Image (tube, grey):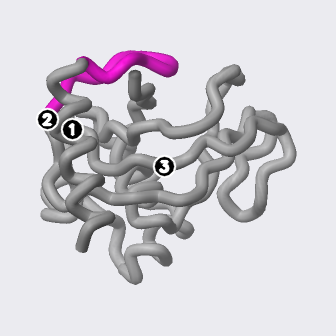
Amino acid sequence: MLKAVTIWQPWSWAVAADLKPVENRTRATRHRGEIAIHAGKHWDEIGACDWRVMEAARSEMPLTADDPRFVFGAIIAVAELVDVTRDGPAPWAEPGQVHWLLAGVRPLADPVPCRGWQNVWDVPPDVEVVVRAQLDRKVRT
């Protein structure tokens, strides 16, 4: 079963774009391996003004929730959760947080609508089928 984590925008976009290899959390997880990146329905105003996100987007202006790059309430990528540490790489690792280190990000061409939850959660089987079909198509092309 595919596991997932919900991340608010614009952070989930930065992860899916393979620009942000660290997800900052207040707690660790035992999960390692494949994890779906779910773009939550919330917009983080602070994140939208964060210099790292603006630089990643190559934008001089703060990003807004109506930017077409941002999807809400859907799985937008699958990555490998390779480690959980308190010594994540700069500049993304926030002091005092637990750093989930992500690698091998595979963005989905078509976001898959899905409800999100807190912590690590199981992707519903019908949603996982659609996600895996996109990943399989990508491998074959």
Q: Amino acid at mark 3?
A: Ala
Name which residue lies at 25% across and 31% down: 128
Name which residue lies at 36% across and 17% down: 117
The one of 118 and 42 positioned closer to us in this rendering:
118
> Is disc 3 in contact with disc 1, using a CB cutoff of under 8 Å?
no
- Answer with left or right where residue 21 lies relative to residue 87: left
> Is disc 2 in contact with disc 3, using a CB cutoff of under 8 Å?
no
Indicate the quadrant where residue 70 lies: bottom left
State which tag comes first along the sequence, 3 or 1. 1
User: In terms of secondary structure, what is the magenta stretch mainly?
Assistant: loop
Locate the N terminus and report the quarter of the image it occupies: top left
The region drawn magenta spans 113-124
Q: Amino acid at mark 1?
A: Ala
Q: Residues within 10 Å of mark 1 (few under 14, many from 20)?
A: many
Residue at numbered disc 1: 74
Q: Distance between the Cα atoms at labels 3 and 1?
A: 15 Å
- Answer with left or right where residue 47 lies relative to residue 68: right
Residue at numbered disc 2: 113
Where disc 3 sits, the SS reads strand
Q: Position of residue 38 (x, y in %)?
A: 33, 37
Q: Distance between the Cα atoms at labels 2 and 1?
A: 4 Å
> Is disc 2 in contact with disc 1, using a CB cutoff of under 8 Å?
yes
Locate the C terminus and report the quarter of the image it occupies: bottom left
Residue at numbered disc 3: 79
Q: Position of residue 4 (x, y in %)?
A: 42, 29
- Answer with left or right where residue 79 lies relative to residue 133: right
Q: Residues within 10 Å of mark 3 (few under 14, many from 20)?
A: many
Where disc 1 sits, the SS reads strand
Name which residue lies at 34% across and 46% down: 9
Q: Amino acid at mark 2?
A: Pro
Which of the labelled discs sits on residue 103, or is there none? none
State which tag comes first along the sequence, 2 or 1. 1
